[in-house]
Amino acid sequence: MRIAVYGRGVEPKDTETLRDFFQVLRDFSCEVFVEVNYLDQLSGLIDITDILYFQTPEELNAAKVLCLISMGGDGTLLDTLRFVRATGLPVLGINLGRLGFLSSVPRDRAYDAIKCLAEGHYIIEKRSMLEIHSGSNLFASMPFALNDFTIHKRDTGSMITIDTFLNGEFFNTYWADGIILSTPTGSTAYSLSCGGPVIFPDSNNFAITPSAPHNLNIRPIIVPDTSVVSFQVKGRGLNHLVSLDSRYEIIEYEQAIAIQKASWHFKLIRLNFQNFIQALRDKLSWGLDNRNF
């Protein structure tokens, strides 16, 4: 079994977990490919003599691995987009971070995770992606997001004005600090913290959620993911922020931006002992009430 591994950094508290994880890979006779920068950080902490490496999406694709394992939090897993892109390579997240909605395998269940992979006891969920279009070719190298697209004010305390269109038809003007367009996957991220709804991963929807809106009658809204959602921003400052997941750019006002569903899906591995409802209960402490026990 060929396995690829990606991480962004090595924390001292994770050293023992990482040693155990790579030993599990050896126990299952896995041929292991590790992203080159992560491998440099692992050097000296674990035995890397039998580990291969990849540096580019092309090298990862050529390795013909079963999946890419993300070692970290949800931000680390979002970073794997630049390697898997539209190749169809599935990703499994082992959570070394905090909440871990996407990197959902607990650090102490690494053995169970590899055993499930070896025995085929998993499913692959197809997660919707966002794709951005703009006149200035924003995020040209990677115009996709798994979680969300956001607009946010920048250099002034004043709110911004965001004209919003659905399929070219005027929808609403938001007076707010910003706005979030999220996929079902991203509904449990920034959108949730701004009062947006939780959306099941297989729902064919987007959520539009304003951040600190001054329109007191405005609430988050669900729209079909077949919609093209466009924005045009005005404000007192010189520019504003836009982001795709954890990546951001600074752009001038009056620039129109259109977001639509990407033509490909991100493939996320779910092991047989996991499901979305359980994740909601565990991560959001739903049902944590003494009357339920």
Image (cartoon, rainbow, N blue to C red):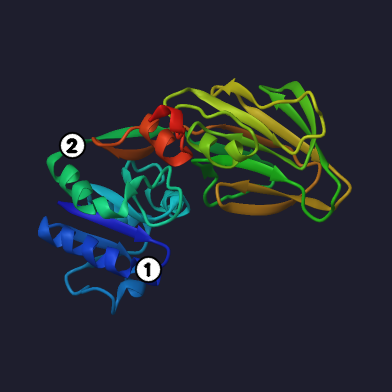
**Residue 234 picture quarter:** top right
Camera-near label (1 vs 2) is: 1
Label 2 crowding class (10 Å Cα cut-off): few <14, some 14-19, many 20+?
A: some
Pick the residue in front: 284 or 236. Answer: 284
Res 59 visible: no
Q: With 238 as the anchor, is 197 left or right in this view?
A: left
Q: With 211 as the anchor, is 29 left or right in this view?
A: left
Residue 128 placed where, x, y %?
A: 46, 32
Q: How many marks?
A: 2
The residue where tag 2 is placed is 121
Residue 200 versus residue 1 in the image, above or below:
above
Residue 82 placed where, x, y %?
A: 44, 52
- Please tell me the numbered disc located at residue 135: none
Residue 165 versus residue 84 in the image, above or below:
above
Amino acid at circle 1: Lys
Pick the residue in front: 183 or 279. Answer: 279
Pick the residue in front: 87 or 49. Answer: 49
Residue 253 placed where, x, y %?
A: 80, 45
Quadrant the C terminus occupies: top left
Residue 134 versus residue 223 in the image, above or below:
below
Amino acid at circle 2: His
**Residue 60 picture quarter:** bottom left
Residue 57 versus residue 225 in the image, above or below:
below
Q: Please tell me which of labels 1 and 2 falls first in the chain.
A: 1
The residue where tag 1 is placed is 13
Q: Report helix, strand or loop for mark 1.
A: helix
Q: Report helix, strand or loop for mark 2.
A: loop
Res 262 visible: yes
Query: Which residue corresponds to the image point at 66% horizontal and 41% vertical from the top-left?
Result: 134
Q: With 131 as the anchor, is 76 left or right in this view?
A: left
Q: Marks 1/2: CA distance?
A: 30 Å
Query: Which residue corresponds to the image point at 61% horizontal and 40% vertical from the top-left?
Result: 193
